[in-house]
Amino acid sequence: MCNDRFANALRVAAKSMNGMFEQMQIGTPATLSTRLERQEKMPTAHLNSVKTLREAADPLYALLSGDQKKGADALMVGPMGMM
């Protein structure tokens, strides 16, 4: 159950962030104001995704063995982690 919740949260987060990036990259040329508005929304969308992932990951992480926790921790290496 915990792993399904985390997997679903990860899928939703990826879809949301991909949609935001696509919006910034393609389509009709945006005005300065529109581009700034999109850039303003990005951190909020990212923060919401991270919160949702953490809420789903915490119960799953608590069930992992010590070695599994080390493996999960290694996945989060880097400036953006798995995001």
Image: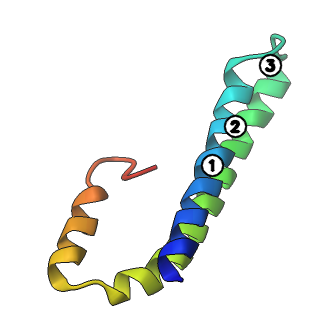
Name the spot of residue 1 as percent of width and height, x first.
54, 83
Disc 3 designates what residue? 32
Tell whether 77 sits left or right of 49.
left
Q: Is residue 9 left or right of residue 79?
A: right
**Which image quadrant for residue 47?**
bottom right
Specify which label sits upstream in the sequence, 3 or 2. Answer: 2
Mark sitting on residue 13: none
Mark 2, residue position: 20
**Mark closer to the observer (3, 2):** 2
Q: Nearer the viewer, residue 48 or 53?
A: 53
Q: Which residue is mark 1?
A: 43
Residue at point 68%, 47% (across, down)? 16
Task: List x then y, in percent, for residue 38.
Answer: 75, 35
Q: Please tell me whether residue 72 is drawn above or below residue 58 in the rendered image.
A: above
18 to 72, vertically: above or below: above
Judged by depth in the image, the label closer to the viewer, 3 or 1, is 1
User: Which type of secondary structure does the marked residue at label 3 adopt?
Assistant: helix
At horizontal 63% and vertical 49% (from top left) the residue drawn is: 43
For disc 2, the neighbor class at 10 Å (few under 14, some 14 to 19, many from 20) is some
